[in-house]
Amino acid sequence: RTIATDEDFVGYLLDDAKVAAVQGEAFGLSPAMRISYATSDELLREACERIQTACAALR
């Protein structure tokens, strides 16, 4: 799988890590992404672990 854009990356996170994010392009900030912090610390830690695992799998 090739990830060429921030949209590709957030799609990858949603499909493979089950973490929702919004591509930076939607806010004029490509190639960044945005995630919501409006949840518990526990869920944020889990999401960060999932993102880390998903990124490691790309190498």
Image: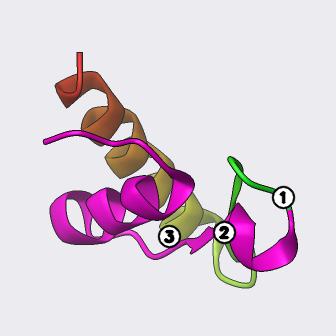
Q: Secondary structure at mark 3?
A: helix
Say which residue label 1 marks: 29
Residue name at image x 54 percent, y 72 percent: 21
Location of residue 52 (image quadrant): top left
Q: Is residue 46 left or right of residue 53?
A: right
Amino acid carrying label 2: it is Ile
Say which residue label 2 marks: 35
Residue span colored magenta: 1-28
Q: Is residue 59 left or right of residue 52?
A: left
**Mark 3 or 2, closer to the camera:** 2
Q: Secondary structure at mark 1?
A: loop
Q: Position of residue 42 (x, y in %)?
A: 53, 65
Residue name at image x 19 percent, y 69 percent: 15
Q: Position of residue 20 (x, y in %)?
A: 45, 76
Residue name at image x 50 percent, y 48 percent: 48
**Mark 3 vs 2, N-terminal side:** 2
**Mark 3 vs 1, N-terminal side:** 1
Q: Secondary structure at mark 2?
A: loop
